[in-house]
Image (spheres, grey):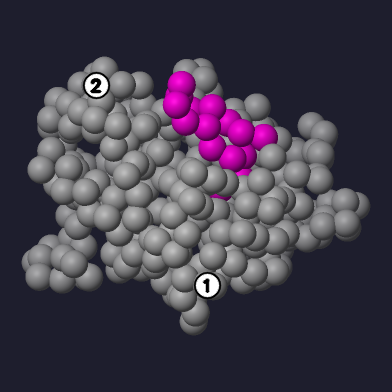
Amino acid sequence: MEKIKLSDDVALSRIVYGMWRLGDDADTSPTHVRAKIDACLNQGITTFDHADIYGDYGAEGIFGAALRADPALRDQIEIVTKCDIVAPIGRYADRPVKHYDTSRAHIMASVETSLRELATDRIDLLLIHRPDPFMDHHETGAALDDLVASGKVRAVGVSNFRPWDCELLQSGMQTPLATNQIEISLSRLSPFTDGDLAFHQRKGQPVMAWSPLGGGALMSAQGPAQDVLDTVAADHGVDRAAVATAFLLAHPARILPVMGTNTLSRITALSDALKVKLDRETWFRLYEAGLGQEVP
């Protein structure tokens, strides 16, 4: 599978496996998690996307248990994780209010916790999870720079940031922000026209796409988008998920879909999206179906 270079030190697999629902699985044993990892590796999917808050701050530890069982596995994968959301659950159950914390102290403590939970000595890509309206961009930027200089983090980026949020943080940093992870799918097409994707495409920064299947709605619901997905899927001998993912992969901005499923059979089919080659007209058929109307 193609790798997308984010920095001199970090390249991610074109399709990324997401850990958002890892803790929701009925089986969270190291053996079962390892089966998911192997299903990804067998397709060339080497990048695994985490966040400290996933699984009520427990998913990183579940994944880390599989790495502790086979430490050599770490050198075959790239680990992405995120920080700055403090919610009154899990390790922060005593906090009175959900908030964002991009202070140096919180970022440094979060990274140390993630390293310990994930059973690793390095994070390949650290993302600030949500824009913090109380952010001191000089403090946050210096903390991220120092983490890269220390070797504990190899590259840094953001998630859910708008272009102006990115520019503010970048203005307080020496290290280039490597990516922005935002919601993009046939159910959420606004980044194609609201400036979000254009901002990063102009800078040559690949974008990671969370919820590329619309939170599952594209797979289970019926409507114009699903009808076109089914038609294109039948033409290529794949399912809706493969076509919806291929829609993102086809874009010249080099979008990296972050795919989340706990079902092994679906994990093994994630790379089916690479079998789907969309020409411009077919891409626009899907785009218009997602919009629910003809383009202007």
Reading the image, the residue beneath label 2 is 173
Residues rendered magenta in the picture: 2-16
**Residue 20 appears in the figure:** no
Tag 2: Cα neighbours inside 10 Å, few (<14), some, or many (≥20)?
some
**Residue 2 appears in the figure:** yes
Q: Position of residue 262 (x, y in %)?
A: 56, 69
Q: Which amino acid type is shown beneath numbered disc 2?
A: Met
Which residue appears farthest toward the right when viewing the image?
Answer: 235
Secondary structure beneath dot 1 equals: helix
Q: CA distance from mark 1 to mark 2?
A: 41 Å
Tag 1: Cα neighbours inside 10 Å, few (<14), some, or many (≥20)?
few
Secondary structure beneath dot 2 equals: loop
Which residue is drawn at the image coordinates 69% and 40% (left, top)?
Answer: 1
Q: Position of residue 9 (x, y in %)?
A: 45, 26
Q: Is residue 226 left or right of residue 4?
A: right
Report how many numbered discs are placed on residues in the image. 2
Q: Looking at the image, which is closer to me, 278 or 65?
A: 65
Reading the image, the residue beneath label 1 is 31
Q: Position of residue 27 (x, y in %)?
A: 49, 79
Q: Position of residue 30 (x, y in %)?
A: 47, 71
Which residue is drawn at the image coordinates 39% and 66% (left, top)?
Answer: 65
Q: Looking at the image, which is closer to me, 217 or 241?
A: 241
Q: Which mark is residue 199?
A: none
Q: Is residue 250 left or right of residue 147?
A: right
Which residue is drawn at the image coordinates 51% and 67% (left, top)?
Answer: 33
Q: Which amino acid type is shown beneath numbered disc 1?
A: Thr
Q: Is residue 220 above or below residue 83?
A: below
Name which quarter of the figure residue 296 lies in. top right
Residue 195 magenta: no
N-term-proximal mark, 1 vs 2: 1
Which residue appears farthest toward the bottom when viewing the image?
Answer: 26
